Amino acid sequence: MIAAAGPSALWYVSRGTGLTALIALTASVVLGILHADRRRPAGAPRMLVESAHRTLSLLVLALLAVHIATTVLDPFAPIRLADAVIPFASSYRPLWLGLGALAFDILAAVAITSALRLRLGARAWRAVHWLAYACWPLAVVHGLGTGTDARSTWMLALTAACVAATLIAAAVRLAGAGPGARAVRGAAAAAALAFLLALPIWLAQGPLARGWARRAGTPPALLASAAVPAPPRHNPQAFSTTVSGTERDAQTADGRIVVDLALHLHGGGEVRVRLAGDPLDGGGVAMRSSAVTLRRGHTYAGRIQTLRGNVLESLVGAPDGRALHLRLVLDLGGGTVRGRLTGEPATAVASS
């Protein structure tokens, strides 16, 4: 049996904890900026503000622990635990994932030195604590560059709110700085302005632009084999036919299982399926990558979208814009395969 495909519960948890961590980090940074200047909401005791800042910081670390764990456990992308702490070492979007790893390392360093504050001394602790401000823009860019929601209106609005809150807090802090802090004020204002101008330009040319997944460094095996083409001139016809062929299993040096299906269609044509993933304890494979090729009048290519037991569904497209939803029900045994393949016209194939 072959198992697991499509967004899993781990993916949703990873996505949710990442977004919540960004919100909590923004709130912590805003409180840190204002509290450093002894500013706080009217009527709020100083101890309450300090406690809120500390609690938010711990919440960020807890959320990131869950975010990292679920990201590593999710079988979709090949992300290792080491990739979460060693910047730019991942094979999956190395730059943008690396920025997140760097932000986490900075937060971990701040947390450790805060726990050892009495031993380190106030000056050394303060020097490390200033790095916490650097992790915030890293986290913002990491979320937009690596996340799957960068094009969503709500995600852009949430990011804009986080940026606005942080910049407003920084402006209030700089406006109240004394004359001796003029150089620091100018440098901070220049950095904030540069970030504010660069972010939308990068968004327009990066995550919001077509083909970002490929340019961001997503492994080719995880990308659909065909991009969205021009509207098709003739839609393909629906069909249903029996298939028969062979199954070959192999194991790579790193322990992954590769399954190859070569199937002939009754009446002419062929379909080939390749999937690779990790072996499951109960048998089967937790899919990490896949490829589907159908030759039936035209050549269609794509990847598996859902996989449940011996039933797989995929979206494949031809260079001229024709697209099909395929459903393949398999009967596997002894290296031979029989089953039924159905195809329905689709408007477009998945975009990368």
Image (cartoon, helix red, strand yellow):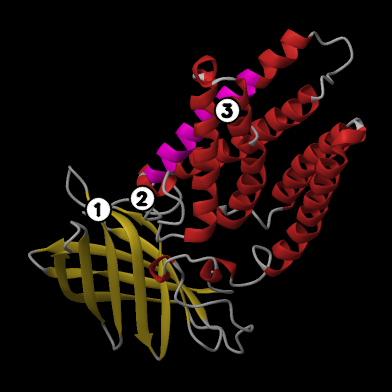
Query: How many residues crowd mark 3 within 10 Å: few (<14), some (14–19), many (20+)?
Result: few
Residue 304 point in image, percent of width and height? 39, 65
Query: Which region is colored magenta?
Result: 54-72
Residue 260 point in image, percent of width and height? 22, 71
Distance, label 1 to label 3, CA atoms, is 46 Å
Left or right: 257 in relation to 347: left
* For marks 2 and 3 on the same chain, the one whose residue lies earlier in the sequence: 2
Can residue 67 be found in the magenta stretch?
A: yes
Which mark, by number, is residue 278? 1
Which mark, by number, is residue 124? 3
Whether tag 2 and tag 1 are in contact, CB under 8 A, the answer is: yes
Quadrant housing residue 303? bottom left
* For marks 1 and 3 on the same chain, the one whose residue lies earlier in the sequence: 3
Per the image, label 2 sits on a secondary structure element best described as: loop
Which mark, by number, is residue 75? 2
Left or right: 338 in relation to 124: left
Question: In the displayed image of the protein, which residue is found farthest to the front?
Answer: 180
Q: Residue at x 76, y 24 (%)?
A: 36
